[in-house]
């Protein structure tokens, strides 16, 4: 790379680095605390002063994945000795494992609804953005603003009619219902972001392809889509973050079958009180997929965010 | 071996038709591509909105299906706008909105500016900084109640370590004076990376040649910052403000988990107030009117803002 | 033994008469007792051949979700263990199946249950023999205290020196406040401890459930006993005002820092972590303390609400009854569950597993008091219960008290009189809207 007079000096870089790293460390402390709490016993988690060093325990994870029930001491004595580590952990509290908890189910729902709606909103967003970018669509600016404006609605504002509507259509508490809902919410972002990306792809590429005998559709799939891959990837991240983490709609519109993890995690209770290690364990595991997704696509995330509304 | 039926169908399709399908006209493609989006938004956003408006003119209550539904005109709107509590909730929301935006833009832009110095490892650190916004706001709000616990929580010990105060001497979410800041801190912690990313995109979109030209003109770094960096990045900054503004006007999950609107009604943001009216008191008609008022407010503010944004962009 | 056999065979016969095995869904709050119910229900599954599914909704969302479900005629739940205050709305809107005929046909008598639970969980309108549920889980607010701290000679001596009487279970609320004040900020084993954990939660029902315990005993009444819904002078009586002032004083002087939004879970955390000497909580939390590693066994003692200034003793009722949801398509099968659940031996096992049975045969059994350290306190508390409005508009009424109480007690706005005067105005408006005034 050639030397540029605008390249920051070594000292500037060093100062910038120190400041950014300081911020990063500070901002990561709460996150690390969540992860660490997942490996504490419930007693250690609520100890005061807070315990920075502690003996790691898998109790949080065991409690996260199991339902437990108290048994009478006589019944407990009659049981065969525990043969797994998780049985041993649970028995300390005069309890037995009665089966898996709902966490697995809720997590799977999050995967289905999160990725399903992300796919759909990116797919619909890409084709709509392409049309807005390349063709004369009547009332284009109004339609674009209309699409943006749908994002301004407080979710609670439309939750009542959506609930009633979903009942009629048999969509309430279904995966499809939630996928459609999240897709609709994400579409505004998706169309706006992707229009920005597609606007930047020179029209000449497609014109060349059309002259070579491609149909318009082929030009779209073979020329535009590969060029827009970066934009599609970063749009997908933002859509997924929303759908993965959404709380208000899912808490109001689902009861069991299609409920995702966010309403579930904060309410994991232990014996009477809140089971902070299990909550933390649930939050940690829930962060993993989206973190992996983000790290894999980080190049796109960092390079590609030219939000659709702004041209270079 | 290929499916014989599919093969038969394919060979039976007249070539002209196949050509017509592949060679759809631009106009058809445009409509085909836009229609699903518009349809979905109409069905899931606009239709419910119209329904909400209709409900807002009635005294309908979802939990009293046997009661007669009466048309009450603008009575619900009058009640809401003359209710002091509505204005208190709007004030709390404004406090939250303004301070989160100010802090996030300041910190987010500074970070982006520093990261843009391209020090070694900046990619890695950027990725790490982005992590908080990947969490679920409901989970974050919930977990911060734990961090804010005066005796058990880390936050108070951290502040105590910095200031020498007793960690048990203050309660971020229990004190009327501190609670509005408690929610600002958590939202800033969570969403500054979002603003940072947009600012970074803005800074990276500035062609180096402009700075090079400025260097040739012997413009000072300070001057370059104010005459090149800020104006060029401004549309991005404004966009970040728009998105955060809209999101935080609707803020529900994080704050409801963090404070539940308390202490008293100190952090009772409009969305939480609305949710109570709609889904706890079940005053559906009244809540619908409330929803319409909020929507019109945010829509109006955003429209003005987008006009300003377009002006800046077209400059 | 014989009667047990007969009952079991009666159930079997009844079940055999039912058409086929059904998959029943029972909805309840997600908490410890719900897990015990899963365990208990295994017997029902084995006997009936029906399969039980469970939908447990966390307390904070429980009312929202379940009332939404009822109001929209959802079919998620066949059986619902709904909160006591929902009964008015569910009965008036026909959302629960009326159980009178079923009880008569199957020899289930409401006299067999603790009277307060029948009134609280099953009747609508209150005081009339119209039953919409079977008492399923008795619950009431009471107190736990650190028996080990109370037993220390040094602490006892210090208390006696300060108050001139022996440290013990408080007999009045004034004594309770003294005790809490005494412990507030005290150093025990190198840790600073605090007086009392009380309910202050804002979002759902917490502060109302807590403040009412004090208000009842100080002379608060919901309305004029002779003139329903007349609240002026009852809700905001002199006693009620003094009660609310007391609750605020207790909050200000004697709670651990950061107790501004505390309900059942936070109370348990405060007590288990050794932060507080006294803790207000629903009885359902008690079995969890008894087996806890740090506060289990002899460390924890239990007592019912102490008396107010005039010697009145009342406690806020919790708990729920089990109902059949009217929009369920499996009502017949759901009723077999209630029939099975009402049997004395099932109720006895329910208690053993940590479920607070409301069946008199269980709680009046000679062995009951000795069966758990908190059993007597449960009985004492159950004898003095009062409940919040169970009107169809209860949620709106509750929202009003939540706001008025929290604004005054926690946020320190206005006076107790203003808060209660405001509450009278809020509630009057609700009843006017309801056409009851």
Image: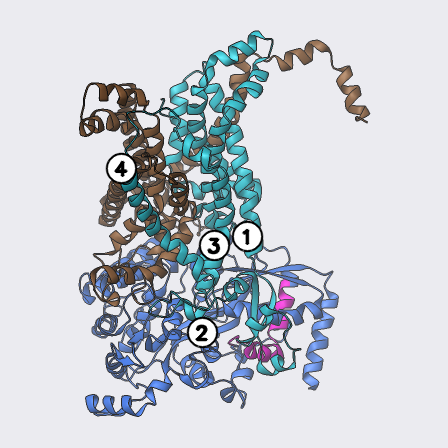
Chain colours: A cyan, B brown, C blue
User: How far across and how far down the image is residue A276, in percent?
Assistant: 44, 63
Q: Which residue is mark 3?
A: A284
Of residues B181 and B231, the one drawn nearer to the viewer in this rendering: B231
Outermost residue toward the top in this view: A211
Q: Which-is-in-front pick, marks 4 and 2?
A: 4
Q: Is residue C366 above or below residue A247?
A: below
Gap in Å between the C-alphas at discs 3 and 1?
Answer: 15 Å
- Start and end of the magenta stretch? C334-356
Mark sitting on residue C285:
2
Label 4: few (<14), some (14–19) or many (≥20) C-alpha neighbours in 10 Å: some
Disc 4 and disc 2 in contact, CB within 8 angstroms: no
Give the mark count.
4
Label 2 resides on the chain identified as C
Question: For the stretch drawn in magenta, what is the main secondary structure?
Answer: helix
Q: Which residue is mark 1?
A: A106
User: How far across and how far down the image is residue B211, in percent?
Assistant: 27, 23
Of residues A245 and B220, the one drawn nearer to the viewer in this rendering: B220
Q: Which residue is mark 4?
A: A12
| Disc nearer the start of the sequence (3/4) | 4
Label 1: few (<14), some (14–19) or many (≥20) C-alpha neighbours in 10 Å: many
Q: Which-is-in-front pick, marks 3 and 1?
A: 3
Indicate the secondary structure of the residue bearing disc 4.
Answer: helix
Residue B51 in the magenta stretch? The answer is: no
Of residues A182 and C151, the one drawn nearer to the viewer in this rendering: C151
């Amino acid at each position: 790379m050639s030397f540029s007079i605008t390249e920051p000096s070594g000292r500037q870089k060093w100062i910038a680095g120190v400041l950014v790293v300081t911020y990063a460390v500070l901002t990561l402390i709460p996150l690390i605390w969540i992860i660490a709490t997942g490996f504490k016993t419930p007693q250690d988690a609520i100890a005061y002063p807070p315990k920075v060093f502690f003996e790691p325990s898998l109790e949080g994870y065991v409690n996260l994945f199991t339902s437990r029930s108290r048994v009478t001491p006589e019944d407990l004595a009659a049981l065969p000795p525990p043969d797994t580590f998780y049985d041993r952990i649970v028995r300390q509290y005069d309890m037995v494992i009665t089966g898996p908890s709902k966490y697995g189910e809720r997590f799977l729902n999050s995967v289905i609804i999160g990725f399903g709606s992300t796919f759909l909103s990116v797919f619909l967003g890409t084709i709509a953005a392409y049309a807005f970018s390349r063709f004369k669509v009547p009332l284009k600016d109004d339609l674009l603003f209309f699409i943006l404006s749908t994002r301004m609605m407080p979710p609670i504002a439309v939750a009542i009619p959506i609930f009633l509507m979903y009942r009629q259509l048999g969509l309430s508490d279904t995966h499809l219902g939630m996928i459609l809902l999240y897709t609709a919410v994400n579409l505004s972002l998706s169309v706006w972001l992707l229009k920005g990306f597609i606007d930047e792809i020179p029209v000449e590429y497609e014109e060349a392809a059309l002259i070579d005998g491609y149909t318009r559709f082929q030009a779209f799939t073979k020329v535009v889509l590969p060029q827009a891959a970066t934009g599609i990837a970063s749009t997908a991240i933002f859509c997924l973050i929303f759908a993965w983490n959404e709380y208000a709609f899912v808490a109001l519109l689902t009861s069991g079958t299609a409920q995702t993890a966010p309403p579930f995690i904060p309410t994991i209770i232990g014996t009477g009180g809140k089971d902070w290690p299990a909550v933390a364990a649930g939050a940690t595991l829930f962060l993993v997929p989206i973190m992996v997704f983000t790290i894999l696509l980080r190049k796109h995330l960092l390079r590609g965010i030219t939000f659709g509304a702004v041209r270079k | 071996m290929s499916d014989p039926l599919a093969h038969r169908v394919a060979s039976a399709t007249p070539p002209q038709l196949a050509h017509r399908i592949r060679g759809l006209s631009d106009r058809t493609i445009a409509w085909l591509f836009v229609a699903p989006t518009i349809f979905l938004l109409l069905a899931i956003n606009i239709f419910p909105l119209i329904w909400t408006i209709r409900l807002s003119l009635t005294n309908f209550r979802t939990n009293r299906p046997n009661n007669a539904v009466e048309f009450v005109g603008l009575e619900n709107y009058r009640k809401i706008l003359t209710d002091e509590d509505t204005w208190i909730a709007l004030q709390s929301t404004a406090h939250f909105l303004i301070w989160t935006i100010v802090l996030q833009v300041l910190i987010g832009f500074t970070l982006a500016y520093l990261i843009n110095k391209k020090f070694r490892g900046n990619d890695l650190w950027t990725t790490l900084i982005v992590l908080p916004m990947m969490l679920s706001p409901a989970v974050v709000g919930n977990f911060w109640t734990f961090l804010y616990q005066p005796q058990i929580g880390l936050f108070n010990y951290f502040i105590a370590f910095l200031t020498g105060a007793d960690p048990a001497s203050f309660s971020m979410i229990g004190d009327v004076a501190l609670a509005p800041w408690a929610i600002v801190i958590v939202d800033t912690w969570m969403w500054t990376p979002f603003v940072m990313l947009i600012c970074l995109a803005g800074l990276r979109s500035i062609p180096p040649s402009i700075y090079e030209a400025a260097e040739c003109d012997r413009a000072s770094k300070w001057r370059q910052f104010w005459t090149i960096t800020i104006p060029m990045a401004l549309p991005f900054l404004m966009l970040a403000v728009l998105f955060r503004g809209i999101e935080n006007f609707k803020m529900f999950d994080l704050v409801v988990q963090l404070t539940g609107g308390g202490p008293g009604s100190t952090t009772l943001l409009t969305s939480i107030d609305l949710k109570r009216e709609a889904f706890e008191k079940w005053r559906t008609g009244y809540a619908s009117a409330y929803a319409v008022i909020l929507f019109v407010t945010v829509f109006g503010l955003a429209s003005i803002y987008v006009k300003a944004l377009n002006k800046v962009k077209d400059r | 033994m014989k009667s047990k056999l007969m009952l079991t065979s009666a159930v079997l016969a009844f079940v055999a008469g039912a058409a086929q095995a059904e998959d029943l869904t029972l909805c309840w709050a997600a908490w410890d007792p719900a897990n015990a119910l899963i365990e208990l229900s295994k017997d029902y599954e084995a006997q009936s051949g029906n399969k039980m599914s469970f939908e447990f909704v966390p307390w904070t969302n429980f009312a929202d979700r379940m009332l939404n479900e009822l109001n929209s005629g959802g079919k998620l739940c066949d059986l619902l263990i709904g909160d006591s205050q929902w009964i008015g709305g569910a009965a008036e809107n026909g959302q629960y199946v009326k159980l009178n005929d079923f009880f008569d046909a199957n020899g289930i008598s409401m006299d067999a249950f603790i009277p307060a639970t029948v009134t609280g969980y099953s009747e609508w309108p209150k005081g009339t023999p119209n039953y919409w549920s079977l008492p399923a889980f008795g619950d009431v607010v009471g107190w736990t205290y650190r028996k080990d701290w109370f037993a220390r000679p040094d602490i006892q001596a210090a208390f006696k020196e300060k108050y001139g009487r022996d440290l013990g279970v408080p007999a009045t609320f004034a004594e309770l406040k003294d005790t809490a004040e005494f412990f507030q900020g005290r150093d025990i084993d190198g840790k600073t401890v605090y007086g009392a954990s009380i309910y202050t939660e804002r979002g759902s029902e917490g502060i109302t459930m807590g403040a009412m315990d004090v208000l009842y005993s100080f002379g608060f009444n919901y309305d004029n006993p002779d003139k329903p819904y007349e609240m002026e002078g009852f809700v905001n009586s002199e006693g009620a005002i003094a009660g609310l002032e007391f609750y605020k004083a207790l909050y200000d002087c004697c709670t651990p820092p950061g107790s501004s939004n505390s309900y059942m879970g936070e109370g348990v955390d405060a007590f288990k972590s050794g932060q507080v000497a006294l803790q207000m909580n629903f009885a359902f939390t008690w079995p969890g303390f008894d087996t806890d590693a740090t506060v289990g066994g002899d460390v924890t003692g239990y007592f019912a609400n102490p008396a107010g200034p005039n010697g009145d003793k009342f406690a806020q009722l919790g708990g729920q009854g089990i109902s059949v949801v009217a929009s369920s398509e499996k009502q017949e099968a759901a009723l077999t569950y209630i029939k099975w659940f009402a049997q004395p031996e099932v109720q006895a096992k329910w208690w053993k597993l940590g479920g607070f049975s409301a069946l008199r045969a269980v709680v009046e059994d000679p062995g009951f008091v000795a069966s758990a350290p908190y059993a007597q306190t449960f009985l004492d508390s159950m004898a003095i219960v009062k409940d919040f409005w169970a009107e169809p508009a209860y949620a709106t009424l509750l929202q009003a008290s939540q706001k008025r109480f929290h604004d005054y007690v926690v946020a320190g706005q206005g006076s107790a009189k203003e808060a209660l005067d405001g509450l009278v105005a809020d509630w009057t408006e609700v009843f006017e809207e309801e056409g009851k005034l």
